[in-house]
Amino acid sequence: MIGREALRGIVLEEVLARLLQDNGYKLLVSEQQDPDALKQAKHGLLVRGRGGEHQADVIGEFDLPVPFCLPLRLFVEAKFTKQKVGIAVVRNAHGTIHDVNEQYSPFSSGVHSVPIRRYQYRYTLFSASGFAPEAQRYALAQQISLVDLSGSGFADLLKLVSDIADATRDLALTREITRLPVGQVRAALRRALGTWTGGFDTPAESDETDAQDEWSPDMGVSSYMTVGRMPGKRSSQVLPHDQLMTIASDLHSNRLGNLIVGFPSAPFILVLRIESRAEFWTYLDRHPGSEITVDIKFAHRGKHDGDWVIVPRDGPPQFRLVFALPELLADWLLNSDGPAAPRVRDIKRGMLSSIVVFQGNRLLRLLYQPQDRR
């Protein structure tokens, strides 16, 4: 049986997939979306690299074109463990990105064939318990994006993920299932979250002897259940469909509506929690433009102690966007003093000067300008 922490990580990844979809990314779930770069394997989707193929449980493609830049694709990996994520996980992320970004596809024109690079891949690691210092240093050096969800502002999200994962695992134990059908679980979560983009209901043909335990995005949830009932020694390793969908339905997108993704001018992303969605929308209605001047402050007191808060600079705080940074990045980026302070403030002006967020069909720029100390 899959471990409790591993299952929580799977549920968290699917929640984050919904978050990406709401913020300008198109989810890739089938090799039919890009046969040259993607490959369907027994246990999920693979991305071809120069030296191998790499599993991509959650991968999204940015839907808007960026001038003078290859189309952007983003790997998402989530860890929901008691320990801080160590350097080994970050090294694996760097190795994956290095390999897939060196993959070239042949472009033929007449008698000539030219190898070209088609995409720019990035990697983001999410952790429910933060990151070890050595992992943070390595990620900063290699431009791997780390998102720390250990702050109190994300406690409700992590509790929801834990409840869904624990209920799923308890259902499997009740049914005496020893090998959790991860593909079936992911399919149910994607149906509940509205991230199912495959649109396929026909089971893929396979000559694998254990095909009844495998699932791919080319198979709908109902098809998985049909395959799960095929004769075979492991045909019982399938969760009851109705009960699984009831559990997954608690992840309805309305419960995730207070989270948005911010894209700064830096090699990392921010997950922002809207403290009051009503206040946020009221502010946007009163300010129809696309640019908002903001301050970024440390939450020294209250329920968000340890987090950072974005507030509008014009007048009283009419909304609050809460986020967390890995300690090393926060100290370097927002808490610098001493002889290097002027240089670091210049870096801050560049890296956090513009944070792009999406709300519906509206693109907003949160403009941050650090105030010089006197």
Image: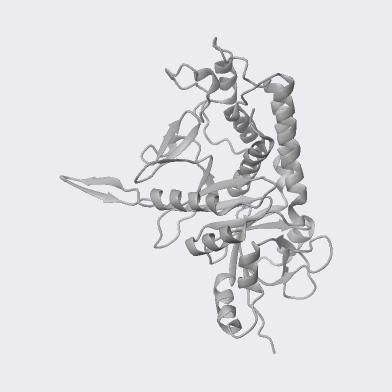
Q: State the residue lying farthest toward the left.
A: 111
Q: Is residue 254 visible?
A: yes
Q: State the residue lying farthest toward the bottom.
A: 374
Q: Is residue 246 above or below residue 91?
A: above
Expressed as whole percent of the image width and height from the top left, the position of residue 242 reads: 71, 22
Q: Is residue 138 above or below residue 74?
A: below
Q: Is residue 286 above or below residue 103?
A: below
Residue at point 65%, 43% (across, down): 12
Return the residue nearer the eye: 318 or 244. 244
Left or right, residue 115 beside residue 151 = left
Return the residue nearer the eye: 69 or 236. 236
Return the residue nearer the eye: 107 or 178. 178
Expressed as whole percent of the image width and height from the top left, the position of residue 225 reads: 60, 19
Left or right, residue 87 beside residue 295 = left
Residue at point 54%, 11% (across, down): 232
**Colour option used:** one colour
Screen quadrant of the N terminus: top right
Expressed as whole percent of the image width and height from the top left, the position of residue 286 reads: 73, 66
Q: Is residue 285 visible?
A: no
Expressed as whole percent of the image width and height from the top left, the position of residue 165 reads: 71, 35
Screen quadrant of the C terminus: bottom right
Identify the image quadrant of residue 287. bottom right
Residue at point 53%, 31% (across, down): 199
Q: Is residue 149 above or below residue 237?
A: below
